[in-house]
Amino acid sequence: MHALIIEDNPDIIANLFGFLEPLGYTLDVARSGNAGLILAIRNHYDAIILDLSLPGMDGVEVCRHLRDDHHNPVPILMLTARDTEQDKVTGFKAGADDYLVKPFSLLELDARLKALVRRMRNEQVQHVLTFGEIRMDIRAGTATREGTNLTLTPTAYKILHTLMRCAPLMASRETLEKAIWGENPPDSDSLRTHIHALRQALDKPFDCPMLITRPGFGYQLVCDNET
């Protein structure tokens, strides 16, 4: 297993290397949030061990950037001394997959990491989505239409991802809002603004629109301009 440790405590780093490397792990280490984010973006890892209290960018922000800006699905285990319920909720909302409080058992850490990786592999996540002229590579965080790269905001990317998962069926407004904002959508009609931005990238440069509004219901991707 190739894992990235983002941790600034030298004693913890030494303990992790001493225990995990003999088990067959290949480990990289970053001692700040910014350095960890760069490594996580540049390299493919099976899992990330992420501390919350880091120099520069903290672990929550690292996690959010990986999930929201780079659409990186790598399993993330947060390893931290913060043990309140709210700390854990914040970590999970940022995109963490598991949470282990210091001091911790190295045996339990190994078991949790292997469970996360096993679950990731067994879920059979479809990393490349295609519908008509659109292709999304979820692992790379990219989208194209007719081979042309689409420049999308993080929110527009989430909308397109949700629409691609639903296609050729319609995605309701509620489904899209939940995908973007979870259980706390804004009161204003922000979704319409983000849909407009998606249309500018997805449809405007091309001959036929693929994003269709179903008034009163939601939105839908179509092929060959079928409405």
Image (cartoon, helix red, strand yellow):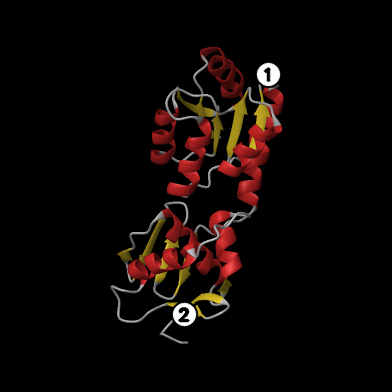
Determine the residue positioned at 33% across, 59% down: 151
Image quarter for residue 40? top left
Image quarter for residue 204? bottom left
Provide the residue designation for mark 1: 103
Residue 196 - label: none
Label 2: few (<14), some (14–19) or many (≥20) C-alpha neighbours in 10 Å = some
Provide the residue designation for mark 2: 222
- Quarter the N terminus occupies: top right
> Where residue 57 appears, x then y in whole percent?
44, 30
**CA separation in Å, label 1 and label 2:** 53 Å
Q: Is residue 87 above or below residue 130?
A: above
Q: Nearer the viewer, residue 103 or 127?
A: 103
Determine the residue positioned at 57% across, 79% down: 216
> Where residue 25 appears, x then y in whole percent?
56, 29
Q: Label 1 is placed on what type of residue? A: Pro
Q: Is residue 211 left or right of residue 147?
A: right
Sequence-wise, the earlier of marks 1 and 2 is 1
Determine the residue positioned at 32% across, 67% down: 147
